Structures are given as C-alpha cells and as structure tokens.
Image (cartoon, rainbow, N blue to C red):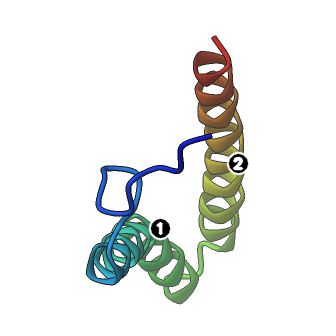
Amino acid sequence: MISPDPSGPYFKTHKEETLNRVHKTVVAVGTSVPELATAIIAKIRGHDEVSLGTVLGSNIFNGLFIIAVAAVTILSLSR
C-alpha cells in the first residue's frame, strides 16, 4: 500500500489548522452575539419571555440544523 504524500492536499499545515480554528471561532461568536444581545436587552426591559424564547428557540433550531447537515453530509460521503 502506498502512503499518501505528506505535501499533498490531504495534509494541512499547522498554520492552516490554526487559521481554520480562528475562522470557526469568529463565525460561532458572530452568530451568537445577536441572540445574546436580544436576550440581554429583553431581560433589562422586563420581557423575560422574549429572552427565554430566543435562547430556547435558537438552541433547538441550531441543534436540529446541525443534525440535518451532518446526516446529509454522511449520506453524500457514503455514496
């Protein structure tokens, strides 16, 4: 069996891995900040139900969306 070339497209350098982690962190923070701001402002204004609905709704949606994307990805890779 021939081992893959370490300089090939399947191996990332340390710099690429670090940048990949930074990009994922920025996206995660960027998508969470609006929900957090909505929840904090609603709590300050006394609308507790809005903050609770925002947090629960976003967590449920994000969980179901990630499961769906993972399922589609696994199915497409298995073909």
Near-viewer residue (18 or 69): 18
Amino acid type indicated by mark 2: Gly
Element at badge 1?
Answer: helix
Q: Nearer the viewer, residue 62 or 57?
A: 62
Q: In the rendered view, tell whether residue 61 sits above or below residue 28.
A: above
Q: Residue 21's spot in the image, x, y percent?
A: 40, 76
Q: Quadrant of residue 37?
A: bottom left
Q: Could you say which quadrant of the image residue 53 lies in?
A: bottom right
Q: Is residue 37 above or below residue 54?
A: below
Q: Could you tell me residue 42's position as x and y percent?
A: 51, 75
Q: Which mark is residue 35?
A: 1
Give the side of residue 55 with respect to residue 16, left or right. right
Residue pictured at 31% horizontal, 50% vertical:
9
- Label number found at residue 63: 2
Q: Residues within 10 Å of mark 2 (few under 14, many from 20)?
A: few
Q: Give the residue drawn at x 61%, y 69%.
A: 51
Give the label on residue 73, or none. none
Pointers 2 and 1 in contact (CB under 8 A)?
A: no
Residue at the image position 60 percent from the left and 54 percent from the top = 58
Residue that appears at 57% across and 83% down? 43
Identify the element where label 2 is drawn. helix
Q: Amino acid at mark 1?
A: Glu
Please determine whether, in this image, residue 5 is positioned above or below residue 72: below
Q: Comparing marks 2 and 1, which lies closer to the viewer?
A: 2
Badge 2 or badge 1: first in the primary sequence:
1
Q: What x and y, as percent, mark residue 49?
A: 69, 64
